[in-house]
Image: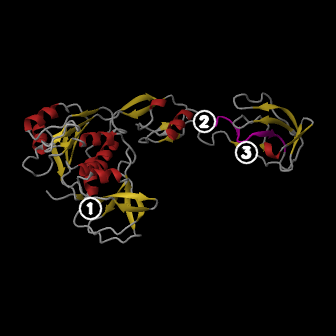
Amino acid sequence: MSLLPLEEAQARLLALVSKMPGESVAVEDALGRVLSGDLKAARTQPPADLSAMDGYAIAGAQGFAGPWELVGESRAGVPFAGSLSAGQATRISTGAHMPEGASSVLIQENATIADGKVSSDDPPPPGRHVRKRGFDFAQGDTVLHSGTRIGPAQLALAMSAGHAALEVARRPTVAILDSGDELARDPAQCGSDQIPASNGAMIAAMLAPLVGETMRLGPVGDDLDALAQALAKAEEADILITSGGASVGDHDLIQQALGDWGAQLAFWKVAIKPGKPLMVAKRGSQVVLGLPGNPVSSFVTCFLFGLPLARATLGMRECLPQALTMRAGEALPATGSRREFLRGVADRSEVRIAASQDSSALRALAEADCLIDRPVGSPETAAGEPVQVYPLHNG
């Protein structure tokens, strides 16, 4: 099977995805959730013409410099009950309703008060310092689109638009299976012929902002019966992610175990480094993502495929990671026949290579805050030249 280019592999993975059904949640519980449909405003904001400043709501033709007779006050939540005639004014606070007849707001700093009247050497023109009714949005406007992830600003907008509950995509359930005879479940009890089973915890942590229940099914040894027993527990998961056992060694049994379980291979091997042995399969509506066992390879492929997979199940508008352009802080080596993702450390607008690029080097990975994208057949890149960089943030 030939190696797939990254973009083709990502597209083929996302084409297998079915969007999760929607569910209603209280708006204050919707942080981090993804809208399953467009959100329309149930009210108009502002609901009336409001003052944008503290000062005086004045009535009169343009050019009239006062004085204006003070006849009352309009404050936020307690509007002035009457209307203003030319030459009249009310005290007004930020966010208060503009009285009927008022044309603008004279800010407090430009006002002079004497004998119950207000005057100014710099009277405002009509409409100055007034927030017009509906300038933010009107009832019926689409304020957020389907696939939008709810952050703090979106949460406030949804509430301002009159919604106490939101229809969001149900979070997918994920089963994570890491396999290998060398894996120790307890990192504090790890023999000299073992390594701690850290990949499952790492993958779960990467996916946590996007998914619901996560089932940890490993570590499992390189044994078909043990793998079958573990896979039986993943029957109801929306997504299954495996780590290890996907390569071509005598003890790499994941493909066979998945086939026995009923999964059909969609593709295997991608032209990237690290992460070539990546595998994707489908079992009914379940999507199976097989990641390499080396920790850095597992991390990079989860970033490039696992996170987009989770985003796609939620119907997010942007599923693939978005690159930034930075300057190389040092010379970058030429690449070969695979696209390389170097672990990097960014410093303002420059990026340097992390201390080690070995696919098992977790310390260097932990120090990295980005991946430097090096296309196939790239010549050596000199310091100062532009490079594409993927910031390493979840969700």
Q: Position of residue 53 (x, y in %)?
A: 73, 42
How crowded is the residue under tag 1: few (<14 C-alpha within 10 Å), some, or many (20+)? many
Give 107 or 348, whichever is nearer the viewer.
Answer: 348
Give 293 or 192, whichever is nearer the viewer.
Answer: 192
Amino acid of disc 3: His
Query: Which residue does the image show at 44% across and 42% down from the upper left?
Result: 148
User: Is the Cβ of the residue at disc 2 closer than 8 Å to that at disc 1?
Assistant: no
Query: Which residue does the image show at 14% across and 51% down from the upper left?
Result: 247
Q: Is residue 298 left or right of residue 318?
A: left
- Sequence-first disc among 1 and 3: 3
How crowded is the residue under tag 2: few (<14 C-alpha within 10 Å), some, or many (20+)? some
**In this rendering, the label closer to the viewer, 1 or 3:** 1
**In this rendering, the label closer to the viewer, 2 or 3:** 3
Query: Which residue does the image show at 31% across and 63% down from the upper left?
Result: 374
Amino acid of disc 2: Thr
Q: Does residue 179 appear in this view?
A: no
Q: Does residue 195 appear in this view?
A: yes
Q: Classify 202 as above or below 371.
A: above
Q: Is residue 280 left or right of residue 22?
A: left
The Cα–Cα distance between marks 2 and 3, rounded to whole angstroms, is 19 Å
Q: Pointer 1: what residue?
A: 339
- Sequence-first disc among 2 and 3: 2
The Cα–Cα distance between marks 2 and 1, rounded to whole angstroms, is 50 Å
Checking the image for residue 129, the label placed there is 3
Q: Pointer 2: what residue?
A: 44
Q: Classify 133 as above or below 385.
A: above
How crowded is the residue under tag 3: few (<14 C-alpha within 10 Å), some, or many (20+)? many
SS assignment at label 1: strand
Q: Is residue 14 left or right of residue 269?
A: right
Amino acid of disc 1: Arg
* Residue sticking out furthest to the left: 250
- Give the residues drawn in magenta, as a range: 46-60
